[in-house]
Amino acid sequence: MKAVVLEKKGLIQIRDVQKDLTLGADDVEVAIKACGICGSDVHYYTHGKIGPYVVEQPMILGHEASGLVTAVGSNVKHLKVGDRVCLEPGIPRFNSAETLAGYYNLDPELTFFATPPIDGCLCEKIVHPAAFAFKLPDELSYYEGAMVEPVAIGMQAATKAEIKPGDVAIVFGAGTIGIVTALCALAGGCSDVIVVDMIDEKLKIAASYNNIHALNLKTDDIKAKVMDLTAGRGCDIAFECSGAKPAILNIHEQVRPAGTVVLVGMPVDPAPFDIVSAQSKELTVKTIFRYANMYPRTIRLIRSGALDIKRLISKVYDFNQAVEGFDRAAGGSLTDVKIMLDLESLGINA
Ligand SMILES: NC(=O)c1ccc[n+]([C@@H]2O[C@H](COP(=O)([O-])OP(=O)(O)OC[C@H]3O[C@@H](n4cnc5c(N)ncnc54)[C@H](O)[C@@H]3O)[C@@H](O)[C@H]2O)c1
Ligand SMILES: [Zn+2]
């Protein structure tokens, strides 16, 4: 079958691959129809590694996918051939202590699409555990289905923040993760979310949503806006979604006493955090790593309209133009949020 393969750092090819499609009793076979390009795919393309994960052999890219169910295993009850699904890309061991405790995303032996040496899903078909395939309502397109993956990160952050109705939040970083986190915070009950970045093009996209106040770090008075929206107290919650050292170091400044900080961004090197300043306000500091049990809620909120993510799909490339899509993503166009690959033209429907 055809696949988008990262042969080595700097070289992506569309070519034929052999893929095992043996269907277990608890599996589904899915013809992939859409797949988003993620910052991590691009990083493997341009740098050949992320932390300890090094591309040492050809790897199929992609982990943000949706598709059509073409076969179901004998134990599968919740899906049938012809259903449209999105796929959760991280598969834990089903009997690990972490999985049994409910935080399966932290299973040390979890395998995740397109994380070396595990192949991703940018190919014609894959076989996947049915428990990690979620039916898309008719109202959702395959593109929106593929967006569930990045949005689930914002959902995990908003859930961890334990938002109360009417909370005011601040988000550092207006990249894909920052914007979806801001949207999830609003959907979770925040009245207002301040989004901070230094790139006006990114802020413009954030500002297109009601109740998001997009501020430029370099030219706007962030403190004044925070005080204005919170009667002088500070934000209830701060989400760090930039991974930038200065944002992490100073994040406590914008949070009220006894407020919450959620660290989402992953700095490339260890980053300092101002412990004493956080202590003096008794801040609750939380971290997230991907998500667990977020797909069903994310799908429901997209369907309800509370998470309007269509406008985050900046550009769609056909499967045959995948290399152009990755090159555009690697070029870092400031107006792009999510670049999507469309696999419908492959015409795999059975
Ligand atoms: N915890 C997780 O599970 C998880 C999952 C996915 C991504 N991430 C991390 O989330 C972060 C964001 O991902 P993304 O894809 O949106 O990246 P991105 O590069 O598209 O966005 C980051 C944004 O932060 C802005 N920024 C830089 N310095 C800033 C500062 N000092 N203050 C405010 N904004 C600043 C940049 O201009 C950029 O717009 C990354 O660090 C990524 O590794 C974490
Ligand atoms: Zn991703």
Image (cartoon, helix red, strand yellow):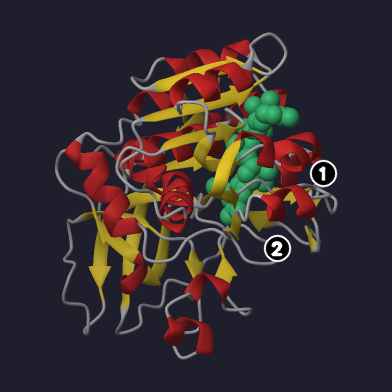
Q: In the rendered structure, which amino acid carries the disc numbered 1?
A: His
Q: Is residue 302 left or right of residue 231?
A: left
Q: Position of residue 274 (x, y in %)?
A: 79, 48
Residue sitting nearer the eye, 225 or 122: 225
Quarter of the rendering containing residue 215: top right
Q: Position of residue 292 (x, y in %)?
A: 43, 66
Residue depicted at x 58% and y 39%:
255
The numbered dot on residue 116 is 2
The numbered dot on residue 86 is none
Q: Secondary structure at mark 2?
A: loop
Residue sitting nearer the eye, 162 or 307: 162
Q: Is residue 101 above or below residue 133?
A: below
Q: Position of residue 117 (x, y in %)?
A: 69, 66
**Which residue is under mark 1?**
47
Could you tell me which quadrant the C terminus lies in?
A: bottom left
Report how many numbered discs are placed on residues in the image. Answer: 2
Distance from disc 2 to disc 1, alpha carbons, whole Å, reads 13 Å
Q: In the rendered structure, which amino acid carries the disc numbered 2?
A: Pro
Residue depicted at x 22% and y 84%:
75
Q: Secondary structure at mark 1?
A: helix
